[in-house]
Image (cartoon, rainbow, N blue to C red):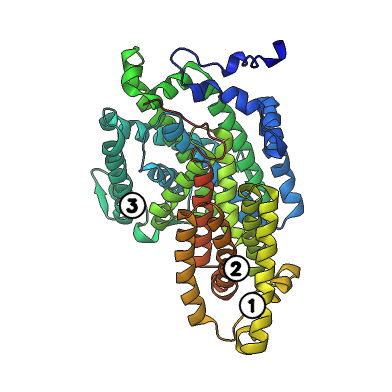
Amino acid sequence: MASDLPERPDARDRPRVGVDEWVAQVEGRRERGRGLTGAAWRFWEWLPPFGRLGLFVVPAALFPIFTGSNTLSRFGVFTLLYVLLGLGLNIVVGFSGLLDLGYVAFYGFGAYTYGFLASGHSGHHWQAEAAIPVVVVLTALLGLLLGLPSRRLLGDYLAIVTLFFGQAFVTFVNNANYINFPFFGHLDLTGGANGLDRIDPLDFFGYRLVTTKQNFYFLLGAFVVVISALYFANESRTGRAWRALREDPLAAEAMSIPVNRLKLLAFSFGAATAGFTGAIYGAIHTGAFPGDYDIGLLITVYAVVILGGTGSLAGVVLGAIIVNCAPEILRTPNQAGWLFYGAIVVALLVKLRPWRRLAGVLAALVGLGFALRGIADAVWPRMTAGTGQGAGLAARMVDHWVLLPRHPEKMADFAYVILIAAILLVTQIRGIWRTVALVPTLYLVAFVWENRLIQETAGATRLILLGALLIGLMNARPQGLMGTARVEIV
């Protein structure tokens, strides 16, 4: 008789007072994760903080040994710059929940200030150990000044004020070479539209960092210091207060949390991190130019933070790797092909269940490709007279599967329009019809890629594929790759 009784639920799965049932069951679902994904999450949660940091720092430290200077600059140096920028923005957006659209201005301010203190343009040549602390302090004060009139603003109103600040900075640096100061006369602060050039490389107590490898290891050390400081700040009382401010400012203020003071602190810390990163960038780039700090960079840094997961330090690192490295890989057709088809295969492996459904789609896709090639060879040879743009084994396999017309321009453009309509259709239908429609849609994807997009991997294709990658990842995990899902009870 006892065996007929229902199993008693685990205590963690029982709804608790004031907690939604879905929220009450999240711990149990997390432990019941199976497969490689579940094992990876359990391993990540088991690791101590320094162990998680080592998962990135150790491979990064070995990266320069196996790469050349150009590859190290594209994949290593700029990734670390994006990481540092993302960490600074994460303080304002992720920790405190403040929408700051003028963040890039602090990055530019740091580069220009360092350039004024140490460059042949200004005639000053401060050592880095003196110039960088001055840059950090001045940028933190600038963040404080921006926060003072904005501390009572939230949401869209704060975004408008900070966006105005960012645009005002661009206007200032384009025109700050014609300012006459009292007692000092005319000073060229920014070089105008031409920017500041001949900025000195980083020089610490006479040791100059002039090679890409030296700059990379300095950036890696700076990353360790910044992320460690932010981890301890996030775990402190200030970090908990920031999270309370992010979740509900009114409730935080009602509980006697100094909301305005926390906003000013977040602005100052975020600005200081951005200014520090800007000083390093100016020294490595040996210049500071107005076009380097526009809205495009702001969007990129926000993509890093949102993709990784707002509020997650590890998510910022992962987001920076994806946002910087994916476009770099897409520069050459061969590498772009591996990333393109690899992403499609991974998406199919993750989304198509059960396995027999995945096997059926792949078998139908392969059969459709070879059937169309055979029919085209017999009926319309012009449809197979072209050659692919890629190289290697994967490209040769695709050449015998995808239709490659002799002059594919107009046909590929027409197929591009049909592909967009097909993707919209697949997202709207359900059940077996979605599986059926998925087969010709995937073939259209391959056709458009081989005949249209692969020819522009250094231009528009990179942006299209990066946007598609971001949209797909955010649809799969709206909270970001490493972010925590938020459940609101309404």
Out of 482 and 136, give the one closest to the viewer. Answer: 482
Judge from the rendering whether residue 473 lies leftward or rightward of residue 216; answer left or right: left
| x, y percent for residue 252 | 36, 18
| Residue 126 seen from this side | no
Rendered view: 159 above or below 438: above
Please provide percent x and percent y for residue 29.
61, 27
- Residue at image mark 1: 372
Give the number of the mark in front: 2 or 1. 1
Note whether 350 is above or below 334 in the view shown.
Answer: above
The percent coordinates of residue 293 (x first, y second) are 41, 52
Q: Is residue 139 above or below residue 187?
A: above
Circle 2 sits in a helix, a strand or a loop, which is it? helix
* Image side of residue 331 versus residue 263, left or right: right
Residue 60 x %, y %: 69, 43
Query: Which-is-in-front pick, marks 2 and 3?
Result: 2
First-in-chain label (2 vs 1): 1
Q: Amino acid at mark 2?
A: Tyr
Q: Nearer the viewer, residue 341 or 326?
A: 341
Query: Residue 443's mark?
Result: 2
Q: CA distance from mark 2 to mark 3?
A: 46 Å
What amino acid is found at the position of numbered circle 3 in the picture? Val
Query: Of label 2 and label 3, which has the lower sequence position?
Result: 3
Judging by the rendered image, the residue that carries numbered circle 3 is 170
Tell me what residue is drawn at x 25 percent, y 43 percent.
183
Task: Assess whether mark 3 and mark 2 are in contact (beta carbons under 8 angstroms).
Answer: no
Residue 232 in view in this figure? yes
Q: CA distance from mark 2 to mark 1?
A: 10 Å
Quarter of the N terminus within the rendering: top right
Label 3, residues with CA under 10 Å away: few <14, some 14-19, many ≥20: many
